[in-house]
Image: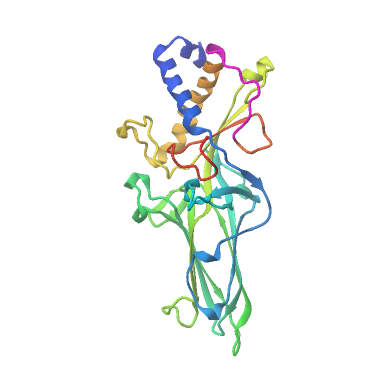
Amino acid sequence: MNHRDETRHDPAKKQYIRQIMISLCLLCATAHSVRSAHAAVALNQQDTSEQSREIGQPGINLWATSGTTITFYANNHRLTNDTPADPVEIPYLVLSRNTSLTPKEERTLLITISDFSTPASGATVSIRMHTQHGDPDLDGGEDNRITVWQEISLIEGSRGTNQPSGKATFAVEFDDMSSTDQGVIPTPTDYYSLELVILDASNSDGKPLLHYHQDYAFLLERQGTATINHFEAKNETGPQELVVYYCDMFPFQRDGKDATSRLPRQAVADYIQTELIPDMVDAIHLQTETWGMSWNGWVSYRDTKEEATLGVALSDGKTWYHGPAP
């Protein structure tokens, strides 16, 4: 007897699957707008907290080497003074798919800082990235954000004059493990903040020439996938593939009403891959085979050319950074 046959004859299992399906329908299917565009994403200079007039207006650009961006709405897509938030494109990276690392271009971020005046003594450019959310294993909060990557680059100057076209380039390839301020740990997946500091090389303890901070600078997430064979077998219209998008820095609970069912961050990927995704596939089959649900006219919430893909973004059911809640 296969797993689906066991589900048919187990009332408790069927009830659990119904709960999964209802949650999936009401909370999880969200409209991400993902684009493949090789243009870099220019960060908003209004977020600069400190800047010396001597350095000018540097250009700060981020992009995934895959060229993929995702449309992001600030303020959780709420209206401000009856005006919707302007959408912005942020780099979109995928660390793993089905618990295996993705190709390097999907998990590599490039950063350039250009067109700034370099003091004659040179400049140091330092970049630090930390998770947008606090470690859920430490109950979250800003004080528990995880610093995942930092680097310093020295830009040489020339005597007697400022250089009008200072430039620094950084490449960040995310791996399954990262050296962080918490030690070597599995790389957190989350939105990431970017902090940039430019100092006069001759006065590293002085006031920064530029101190820049950008929240939600890019998204690094995980994916899990599964094939839905039912529709292919019956030659019917419907989703052929399930793709689950998630970040392990979001707190996960097996039961939304039971706080004791919360999973440690490191257990999230295995739980989603080995338990949640198979249950979701069973739920889809249950709806189709037992409930007689028709999928004619199926339209994926995901803005993608893969019309047969059912995209499910796992969140708290309240946060929809990439579009209005369905």
Is 9 positioned to the left or the right of 33 in the image?
left
Is 129 positioned to the left or the right of 92 in the image?
left
Q: Tell me where the magenta segment starts and ends, as one range.
A: 289-301
The residue closer to the viewer here, 167 or 116, is 116
User: Which residue sits at x=46%, y=37%?
Assistant: 269
User: Vertically, is 129 above or below 20?
Assistant: below
User: Which residue sits at x=52%, y=51%?
Assistant: 83
Residue 281 drawn at (x, y percent): 53, 23
* View extreme (bottom): residue: 160
The residue closer to the viewer here, 98 or 297, is 297
Residue 137 drawn at (x, y percent): 34, 44
Majority secondary structure of magenta residues = loop
Q: Is residue 107 visible?
A: no
User: Vertically, is 80 above or below 55?
Assistant: above
User: Vertically, is 45 above or below 86?
Assistant: below
Q: Is 297 part of what is drawn in magenta?
A: yes
